[in-house]
């Protein structure tokens, strides 16, 4: 059930909801919009967001609970500073992130777009330093066992994963960078944009996290370790068989503070005039 309702006292019959409905699920029947066939709705909530008077409720979402956008969006300069000031953080404080802050970051990141609004992501978080340390130690122990028993799988990063346990014994942490937390994002195997959705989500997560003072780093090494070398750990992380691991990110309170952006100059863009000659 969509629970699509229209407050007729607020509705001005402008048709904005129907015009902005991509699958054309909303139809103007007389003065007011309706959804004759609920199967056509893609549950994007555009109708609720675009209504100028807040007359539409859908899927249990009331416009009164939404945040108004007019006059509240950050200035372009602020967004630019956040994006250009983002750094890959590899030095962290050994402490848990404030649960309220992390909850806020996760709630906002959940608004990241997915292909065809499929919204089938499975987000896995290790948000406790003790759990993270135990996970970290087991990963290195399993890698060491594979090296000792000459069972390291053939893969493009075999040399690195073979040397990682020795670096760990020397006090280094080449995979996890001593980060106190990690987030793993998986997508349904039958999702329309299986690979892309996880990366888009983590981009949203990263920017929101860094705006809140947290540090992040994309962790391809952990991703490849789980995908290529230790896939038996994936179900133990609670990731269902119906989903495929998309990518990993480390995060926590940074032990380093960057003081300025690193300007890269104008973008190198190749403009196309069509038809091509």
Image: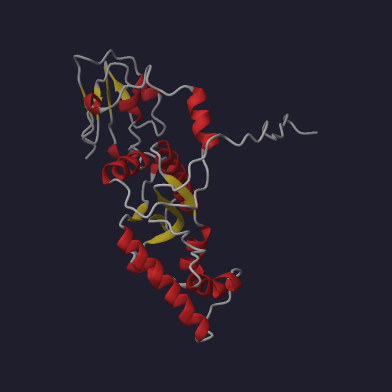
Task: Tell me: 43 left or right of 143.
Answer: left
Q: Residue 77's x, y, as percent?
A: 52, 24
Q: In which quadrant is the C terminus drawn?
A: top right
- Of all residues, the one furthest to the right in this rendering is 277
Q: Position of residue 132 (x, y in %)?
A: 35, 62
Check the picture and name the quadrant holding the N terminus: top left
Q: Is residue 249 above or below residue 112?
A: below
Identify the image quadrant of residue 36: top left
Q: Is residue 118 above or below residue 23?
A: below
Q: Position of residue 271 (x, y in %)?
A: 71, 31
Q: Is residue 270 left or right of residue 97?
A: right
Residue 33 appearing in the image? yes
Q: Residue at x 25, y 32 (%)?
A: 58
Asked whether, in this view, residue 241 is left or right of residue 153, the answer is: left
At x 54%, y 85%, the residue is 150
Foreground pick, 41 / 124: 124
Location of residue 89 with respect to 83 vertically, above or below: below
Of all residues shown, which one is farthest toward the bottom? 149
Viewer-side residue, 128 vs 19: 128
């Amino acid at each position: 059930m969509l629970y699509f309702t229209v407050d007729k006292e607020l509705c001005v019959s402008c048709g904005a909801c129907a015009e902005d409905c991509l699958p054309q699920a909303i139809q103007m029947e007389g003065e007011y919009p309706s959804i004759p066939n609920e199967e056509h709705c893609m549950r994007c909530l555009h109708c609720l967001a675009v209504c100028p008077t807040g007359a539409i409720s859908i899927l249990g979402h009331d416009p009164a609970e939404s945040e108004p956008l007019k006059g509240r969006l950050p200035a372009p300069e602020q967004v630019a500073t956040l994006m250009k000031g983002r750094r890959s953080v590899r030095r962290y404080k050994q402490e848990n992130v404030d649960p309220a802050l992390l909850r806020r970051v996760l709630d906002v990141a959940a608004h990241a777009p997915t292909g065809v609004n499929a919204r089938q992501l499975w987000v896995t978080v290790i948000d406790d330093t003790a759990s993270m340390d135990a996970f970290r130690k087991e990963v290195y122990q399993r890698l060491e066992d594979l090296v000792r028993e000459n069972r390291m799988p053939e893969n493009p990063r075999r040399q690195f994963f073979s040397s990682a346990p020795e670096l760990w014994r020397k006090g280094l942490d080449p995979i996890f960078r001593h980060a106190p937390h990690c987030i793993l994002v998986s997508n349904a195997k039958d999702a329309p944009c299986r690979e892309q959705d996880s990366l888009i989500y983590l981009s949203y997560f990263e920017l929101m996290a860094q705006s809140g003072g947290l540090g992040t780093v994309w962790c391809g090494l952990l991703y490849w370790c789980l995908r290529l070398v230790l896939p038996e750990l994936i179900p133990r992380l609670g990731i269902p068989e119906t989903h495929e691991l998309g990518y990993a990110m480390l995060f926590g309170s940074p032990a380093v503070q960057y003081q300025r952006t690193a300007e890269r100059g104008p973008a190198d863009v190749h403009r196309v005039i069509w038809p091509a000659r």
